[in-house]
Image (cartoon, grey):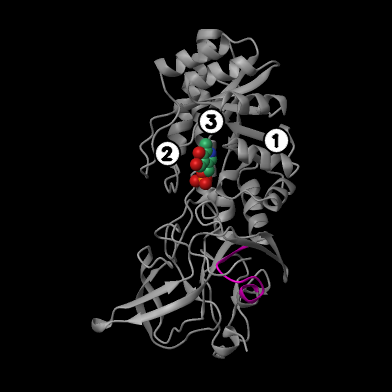
Amino acid sequence: MTLVDFFSPVRSGTTAHLDSAIWPHGARYDADGRIMVGGVALADIAETYGTAARVVDEHEVRLRCRAYRKTFPEAEIAYAATALLIGVVADWVTDEGLSMAVHSSGELAAALAAGVDPKRIILHANGLSREELATAVTQRVNRIVLGSPAEVDLLATVATRTQRVLLRLDPGIERDTRQSAAGFALGTPAAAAVAQVLGVPTLELIGFSCHLGSQLYNPDHYGEAIRRMIAEMAQVRHDHDRLLTDLDLGGGHAIAYRSGDAEMNLPELSAIIEDALDAGCARQHFPRPNVALEPGRGIVARAGVTLHRVMSVKHSDGGHVSVVIDSAARARSGDGAGMVVANRRATGPQVTATVAGRAGDVILATGVRLPADLRPGELLAVPCTGAYHHSSTRTRVIAVRAGQYAQLVHREPDFLDRDAS
Ligand SMILES: Cc1ncc(COP(=O)(O)O)c(C=O)c1O
C-alpha cells in the first residue's frame, strides 16, 4: 500500500472548484477528490517520480502564448526565458509563434540547443563576457540589448559583422516594486550611448528597450514609458538623422499568486499601449515603431504546480500548527502561497498553519489554511509556481498534456537529500 492509498481520498458529492485565476486551465478534482492538472492526477505524478516535483502544464503555456498574441496582434511577443527555460518549453512557445528573450549565455545556449531560430532571439547583454558576446555574434543572434557603455565597448570589439542592437533605457517610471533601474537614463546618458553606438560601424542601432520592473499591475506605467521613449527616438532622428524602428517594452506583467490577488489586465494594457503609441507618434510626427513585449511570468507562472510531501505536522499549545514539507532549504520564502492538499478533497475543519522546508528554519509560508486532520505523507500542491522557481529549487520537472506525463528534468541532489533519483 502506498502513502497515497493509505490516506485514501474522501469522496464528496459537492462540485469542487480550483480558482482558474491561479490554477492551470482545466485543473479540477476528479471523482476521487484528487487534483488533476492537464488530465493527470497530481498524486499519480508524486507516486511515479517522488517529491518535491514541479508539474508544468503544456496546454496552459500554449493558452497564455495565444492570449498574448491575440491581445497584442501588432506586437512581437518574446518569451523571457529567464522565467523558465527547459527545451520543451522553448518548443511550445516558439511553436505558438513567440520569439525568445534570453538574459545569459546559458539561456542562449539552451535556446539554441532547443532549436530556436537565432533570428527570433533577443539577447540582453547585461553581465556577459567578451567571449559570450562573441559567441552571440557568431551565432547570428538577431538583436543584442546593451545597457552600459562598457557593454557597447565590449560588443564593438567582437562584432566582426553587422550586429543589430537596441539600447536599454531607464524611462524613469515609478515602479511598483523594489527592482533597481537598469540601462541609460533619458536625456544626456541616453544621447551619449546613442552616439557611442553610432560611432561603431558594425553596430546597427535599431531601437530602444526598457524593462519597468516585475509584478507590475498598473498598465499606465507602460503608456508613460512609451511616450518618453518615442520622444527619445525622435531626438535621435533630430540629432543624427537616424530613424529608429524598434521599441521593446520588456516584461513585468503581474500575475495572481493567491485567489483574489490583482494581476495585469492584458486587454487594458493593450489599449493603453495603442493609445500611447498613437499619441506619442502623433506628437513627435514619428512613424509607429515595431513593438516587442517580453513576458516571462505571464507565460509560465500559472502553468506550474509544485508538489510536496508532508513530513511532519506539529500542533502546539495555543493552537499553532507547524507543517514541515520536503522542500529544499533554498526554496524561497513565500513559495507556499495558495498551497492545498492534492491527494484528497478536504472538506472538514481547517487550521491556519506555518509551513517550513526540511531545514525547519526556512519558513515557506505563514497563514496557510490546511485541513485540521493533515497527516505526514499527504501531498500538498502549490499553484502558480511555473516562473522563477526552477532556478531557486532545482527539483524534478514533469510536463503534463491531455492525460499524459513525462519527466523533463531530473532533480539535482542537495545536502538535505535522503533519497536520490
Ligand atoms: C529585460 C527583461 N525582460 C523581461 C523580463 C521578464 O519579466 P517578467 O517575468 O516579470 O515578465 C525580465 C525579467 O527580469 C527582464 O529583465
Q: Given contact means CB atoms under 8 Å apart, are the residues at marks 3 and 1 in contact?
A: no
The image quadrant where one finds the N terminus is: bottom right
The residue at which mark 2 appears reads as 221
Q: Of residues 19 and 265, which is closer to you in this image? A: 19
User: Which residue is found at the position 38% from the left and 68% from the top?
Assistant: 360
Residue 43 at x, y percent in the picture: 61, 77
Q: Residue flagged by tag 3: what amino acid is it?
A: Asp
Q: Is residue 8 visible?
A: no
Query: How many marks on residues?
Result: 3
Distance between the alpha carbons at the discs numbered 2 and 3: 16 Å
Distance between the alpha carbons at the discs numbered 2 and 1: 27 Å
User: Which residue is found at the position 42% from the left and 78% from the top?
Assistant: 312
User: Between disc 2 and disc 3, whose residue precedes?
Assistant: 2
Distance between the alpha carbons at the discs numbered 3 and 1: 26 Å
Which dot marks residue 120? Answer: 1
Q: Is residue 3 magenta?
A: no
User: Which range is magenta?
Assistant: 45-55
User: Between disc 2 and disc 1, whose residue precedes?
Assistant: 1
Is the residue 93 above or below the residue 48 in the image? above
* Element under disc 2: helix
Disc 3 packing (10 Å; few <14; some 14–19; many ≥20) = some
The image quadrant where one finds the C terminus is: bottom right
Which quadrant of the figure has residue 156?
A: top right
Q: Is residue 63 left or right of residue 381?
A: right
The residue at which mark 3 appears reads as 278
User: Which residue is found at the position 49% from the left and 70% from the top?
Assistant: 326
Q: Residue flagged by tag 1: what amino acid is it?
A: Arg
Residue 41 at x, y percent in the picture: 64, 76
